Every structure is written in structure tokens, then in C-alpha cells.
Image (cartoon, rainbow, N blue to C red):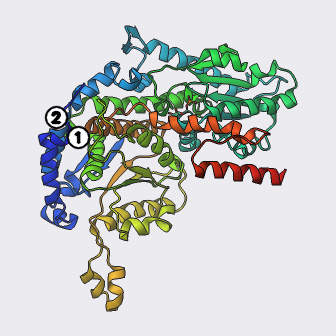
Amino acid sequence: MTKTPLREMAAWKALETHATTIGTKHLREMFAADARRGERMTAEACGLFLDYSKHRIDDQTLSLFQALADECGLEDRRAAMFRGDKINLTENRAVLHTALRAPREAVIEVDGRNVVPDVHAVLDKMAAFAESIRSGVWTGFTGKPIRNVVNIGIGGSDLGPVMAYEALRHYSQRELTMRFVSNVDGSDFAEAVHGLDPEETLFIVSSKTFTTLETMTNAHSARVWALARLKHHDAVAKHFVAVSTNAAEVAKFGIDTANMFGFWDWVGGRYSMDAAIGLSTMIAIGAENFQRMLAGFHAMDEHFRTAPLARNLPFLMGMLTVWYTSFFSAETVAVLPYDNYLKRFPAYLQQLTMESNGKHVTLDGRRVDYQTCPIFWGEPGTNGQHSFYQLIHQGTRLIPCDFIGFAHSLNPLGNHHDLLMSNVFAQAEALAFGKTTEQVKAEGTADWLVPHRTFEGNRPSSVILAEKMTPEILGQLVALYEHSVFVQGVVWQIDSFDQWGVELGKVLAVRIIPELESAAEPELKHDSSTNALIRRYRAMRRKQA
Ligand code: F6P
């Protein structure tokens, strides 16, 4: 499929010219010229309110965003995704995470088969299992109820579950201890099982492929750890369940496939937290709350699918990311949740955004001649304010920010919440409007100090507001970013759903393992740096031994 190169599109060229005009304007001027800008440049969907007025855009920018979307065929591509077309071209797969949260009666076909009943059959099986753990009906090999659940997985099989557990911890069954192991570093495993009783511990081995080195290594160590106490191989069936698409490997590991929760190749790893990969989430918060989260996802799917682009939250956010990345050379986006429960949200978004859009060739294999995915990063407010905000306010880089805040705290405590939220509004205000030299001078600041105390402003941010952190809102937020990533990928003409870039390192590591482990000095055929590092590592290991 050959498309018009992006930079040759009329709307792209118009945006390039337009960016030079906008580049000379300050947000102060734009607000001064339009008293209603702060109310006008907002949009609302489901339970999320988006203020995008503090962005370096005007009405023409927004029309050009739409013109570019038209030229890129965004609406057709969106329809193709929701329909189940194989839009993940390099893997020849449909991209149907939206089917994971479709209502029971929906019909979505892949290769002529309606997948919605399959999705709900797994959800029902997960619900029954989660309930049996939560109620204590499911017992371990020695008859004790399960008190600890350890999810073993990495990437999409870890980041979503950890993030969702932390985000919805308020709704979780507190008697259950939830832990997560991802890193192949033995310390991660050791700390995750520290203090746990194997008789009361359930491991969920979560891996789409069931071949991922980190996960399988941790799963084998977990089996050794559990059987060291439980002694009998039959204990595996009571203490291990699997979430995977690969029944053969699950069986080979020794897990009864009756205790396997499946999903499908049309669910990308980083889009799977609402598939069976969410089993740990469901055990923690219960099936009903999990359904509420799915309803939130679905509501945002419907908004993205049907709302006019001018009011479409994922469209607006996606285009803003394209705008700063491709026209203003912004290299990063900071995601700043002012809710401690969202502390893992930026880490989750890193895989979602960067594994999806960190690509340098178009769908038809041409090298792009524009920047694609920026680096996403962030920390919960207000901690970030006392760490990296200095650079956002006064550094030399343009860093668009997403502030996320709530009207109500789940833990009202004195005036904590108003203090917290005052910082959201203050930070966005300070970034946009700054503090002029005149203002600083008028405060009687010594001349030499004035430049240091001046804030240029004109630094863009979005503010996303919701009532409070609920399962529905979490689903909406995640779907908002999923679809924003989709919009960016369509404009940049890349395959947002493959991840070939993670392969090379994995292959090389597998080649190096025996070179680290062999007793005899291996013949090394890498570059001189890699050879020398391996030799030094081996020498250091020998010294320790
Ligand atoms: O990092 C590469 C990747 O393939 C991710 O896309 C995926 O989420 C992760 O590894 C884990 O894969 P699996 O679920 O198959 O173990």
C-alpha cells in the first residue's frame, strides 16, 4: 500500500507554514485576544474533561489538524481497526483490543468468526476463578486459602496489571497481598516472594507467547520455590495458573490447561490489560469492578469511534502530540498525574506509546523524513515539582505536559486535596503565562537576578479532569491514550502494532548467555568492546568465586 508521502500532503505543508506563524505567538497574546479561549478550547467525553486551551494552537490549527486527518484517511483507518481488518500489516493481524470491552451482544468478526462470545467466555471463567480466590473456596495444595497472588510477566503482561492494581488499590480486597515480578534480575523475584508462605501463594504466569525469557525464568524459579515447601508435583495445579495464547507451552510447563485463561493474536501485549492479562486485577478488585473498568474502556471506544473530530478527545490529544513532535521538534511529553494511585501510569504509557510508535519506517517500508513518537515520561505530582519541573519551566526544551487531576480524593484528609489540585492549576498557569521581566523587576528584584527569576512561559499543557479515580475512569483514561497513539500512528503512516525493534537485543542476549556461563574460555567473535566487557565480567565472576 503506497501512500502519498506525509510531507507532500497539502495539509502537512499548510501546517508547516502555519507552525511558523504560531511559533511567533505567545499564549499570553492568544488568551488576551480571546476572552473565552479557556472555555472554548475544551472538550468532554464520558467522565473526562479536557482543557487544551493552553496549547500553541488557534482555530486554524484545529481545522488543519482535521484536514490532515482527512488526507491521511484517519476515519477509514479507524473504521478498519474497529471492524477487525488486519491493520497490523507486518504481523498480518487484526487489532481488536476494542473487542475485549465490547458488550456481550456485539458482533465483531475476525476471519468470519464472531469473537465477542469468546471474549465473554474468558471473562466469565476469569470471574468464577477470581471469586473462588477472593472467597477462599480455592485452596492451595495443603488446604489453606490463597492469601498472596504473584503475577509473573513482563512488558504488557506486567505493566498493565501493576498499573491497574495500583490505580484501583482503593477498590481491592485488602486481605490479599498482590505482588508482581517482571525483571529477570533474581532480586525482583526474591523480593516479590519475601515473607510469603508457599502454601498460601498463587502464581499467575502471564505471557502471551509463553516463551519470553524473563517470564519463563521467573516462572521456573517460582515452581522451584513453591515445590521446595510443597514437595509434591501435583501442587503446581493448585498454585500456578497461566494467562497465554500458547496452550502447548503452558501444558509443557506443567500447568493444567483447565487453569489457563486465553486470549488471541489480535490483542497486542501492550493492549492486553483488559484481556485475561488482567486476571490479577480482577482478583484484586473483583469481577464487578473489572466490568466497570471495561465499561469505561468501551465508553471511550464509542466516543473515539463516533464523536466529531472537533470534539474527539483521542483525536485532539493525538494531533497535539504530532504537532509538537513533528513541527516544533519537541522530544518528550511529560505525563503528570496528580493522584498517587496513578503512580505507575507514566510507566505503563511508556510501553503503550513508545513500543507502538517508536518506528522509523512507514507501512510501505520507506524511511520517514519527520520525527515520530516522542519520549513519554512522568511522575505523580507534586513529587515531580520538587525534582524535574525546574527544567520544564526554565530549561531550553519544549516539553508538552499532560496534567491529570480529580475533583474528589478517595481519601479525603483535611485540605490535602485542595492543596494538591491547586498545584495542577498553578503549574499549568505558570507554564503558559510565565512571569515577565517587567513583573520580576516590579517586585524590586535586583537587576542581576532578574533573568534568573523570569519565566518565559508559552509552555504548552493539557489538563484532564475527572470526578474521582474509579474503575470506569481508569478504563477511559487508558483507552484515551490507546486511541491517541492510534491517531499519531495513522498520521505518521507507521504500523503502531508491531514491535520488531525489541528483537535484535533478545537474539544477541541468547547468543551471549553461553559465553557467560561456559567453564572453558569461549572464543568471542563480537566487536572489541563487547568482547572486552564479556571477558571482564567473567574475570570478575571468577574472582568472587
Ligand atoms: O517487549 C516485547 C514484548 O513482546 C511486548 O510487546 C510484550 O508485552 C512483552 O514482550 C511480553 O511478551 P509476552 O506476553 O509474550 O511474554
Queried on whether the Cβ of the residue with tag 1 lies below 8 angstroms from ligand 1, the answer reads no
Give the x, y percent position of residue 214. Answer: 64, 35
Left-right relation of 52 to 376 = left
Marks 1 and 2, how far apart at CA: 19 Å
Ligand 1: give its quadrant. top right
Q: Nearer the viewer, residue 414 or 233?
A: 233
Callout 1 environment at 10 Å: few (<14), some (14 to 19), or many (20+)? some
Residue 445 seen anywhere in this rendered image of the structure: no
> Secondary structure under badge 1?
helix
Give the x, y percent position of residue 367. Answer: 30, 39
Q: Is there a contact, CB below 8 Å, between mark 1 and mark 2?
A: no
**What residue is shown at x 23% (from left), y 26% (from top)?**
76
Q: Is 67 located above or below residue 38 in the figure?
A: above
> Which is in the foreground here, disc 1 or disc 2?
2
Residue highlighted by disc 2: 71
Give the x, y percent position of residue 498. Answer: 42, 31
Callout 2 environment at 10 Å: few (<14), some (14 to 19), or many (20+)? some
Q: Is 160 located above or below residue 467 in the figure?
A: above
Residue highlighted by disc 1: 311
Residue 38 seen anywhere in this rendered image of the structure: yes
- Three-letter code for the amino acid on which mark 2 is drawn: Glu
| Rendering quarter of residue 433 | bottom left
Q: Which image quarter holds the N terminus? A: top left
**Sequence-first tag of 1 and 2:** 2
